[in-house]
Image: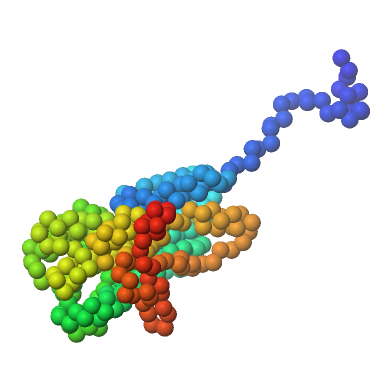
Amino acid sequence: MLSAAVLSSCGIQQKTEQTPAPPKQERVTVGFSQIGSESDWRMASTASIQQAFADSPYTLLFNDGQQKQENQIKAIREFIDQDVDYIILDPCIETGWDSALMEAKEAGIPVIVIDRAVEVSDESLYAAWIGSDFYLEGQRAMKWLEAYLKKEGYEEPVNLVGIQGTIGATAQIGRSRALEEAANAHEDWTLLEEQPGDYTEAKGKEVMEEYLRKYQDKIQVVYCENDNEAYGAIDAIQESGRKVGMDVKNGDILVLSFDATHDGLRMALEKKIAVNTECSPLYGKRLVKMIDEMEQGELPEHTTYIEEGQFSTYSGIRAVWVVDNSYLVTKLTNEILEEREY
Ligand code: GZL
């Protein structure tokens, strides 16, 4: 057996003890605190993110907060304990996140907020926010209603009811504000009542049943802050013997909705929803790209609004104006529905 001296003199390093294997390149791990599974939109949001990360070099840890902030805060702390590289948060409501986000910041873990926003004392508590302009969504819906009533020559008083999203969610705050402002701006419009429907079909139906009991045939417009609430409201209206549709002059109740999910657009194609204002849930690829960039040391844009559309079968309105900007209203067709991604 050649001596160690001979071996080493010819440059062959003889392993005198087990040298540890080099650490395997650890995969970047991302913790995602999702709000829940309350709506078709939410399920599409989850699917988009899970699929994009499955196709990426990153490991996604997923937590369903079941629409409770305390569950989401618990998830954030668990992600910190697991020493993830990034946290993605879709916050159920805007307030109450400072301490959890401070803990992530102190752990050196960047937080990317998506969809709904957080209201915090220091905006550096999160690295970036990508989401929708929910107030603009509501303004577009109200401008469409104003144009529709004018085009139809409807000059009677207009009574509206609102079925809100989860109180305190950015989407609810923005969409409700637009409804309230529009009702105040029109002398002959009366907002009879608003109640939370929590973005669910069951609650949407329950609230609409109460409205029908209270206001009977006084209601002309139902403003649903998402598609699942609209499905519930439409069921309640039809079960009461009234009709949803586009002919307000002959007693149809106009249902306005948000999200423009596949079934929401199908209901619009059937004229059960008069106009559906889109809110895109497709964050997955954007988030993977953002993490790619952050892995390269690039700072992401701190605030990014996503582009969204509006759909109706009513061909008399091809665009609406909000302040100085015009926004396209897409005439809804079967082809658009068939191509719908979510
Ligand atoms: C809005 C999103 C809302 C959707 C609902 O971006 O947060 O939550 O409008 C979902 O369908 O439940």
In x, y percent, where is residue 208?
16, 61
In x, y percent, where is residue 72?
37, 52
Is 25 on the left-hand or right-hand side of 110?
right
In x, y percent, where is residue 342?
39, 53
Residue 291 vertical placement versus 24 (above, below): below
Q: Is residue 225 visible?
A: no
Is 46 on the left-hand or right-hand side of 163?
right
Instruction: Please tell me which residue is depicted at 17% across the width and 67% down the height of the picture.
Output: 253
In x, y percent, where is residue 161?
18, 69
Instruction: Please tell me which residue is depicted at 37% across the width and 80% down the height of the picture.
Output: 321
Residue 205 vertical placement versus 211 (above, below): above
Front position in the image: 302 or 249: 249
The quadrant in which the N terminus is found is: top right
Instruction: Please tell me which residue is depicted at 63% across the width and 59% down the height of the picture.
Output: 297
Q: Which quadrant of the view contains residue 329?
A: bottom left
Is 107 on the left-hand or right-hand side of 342?
right
Front position in the image: 337 or 13: 337
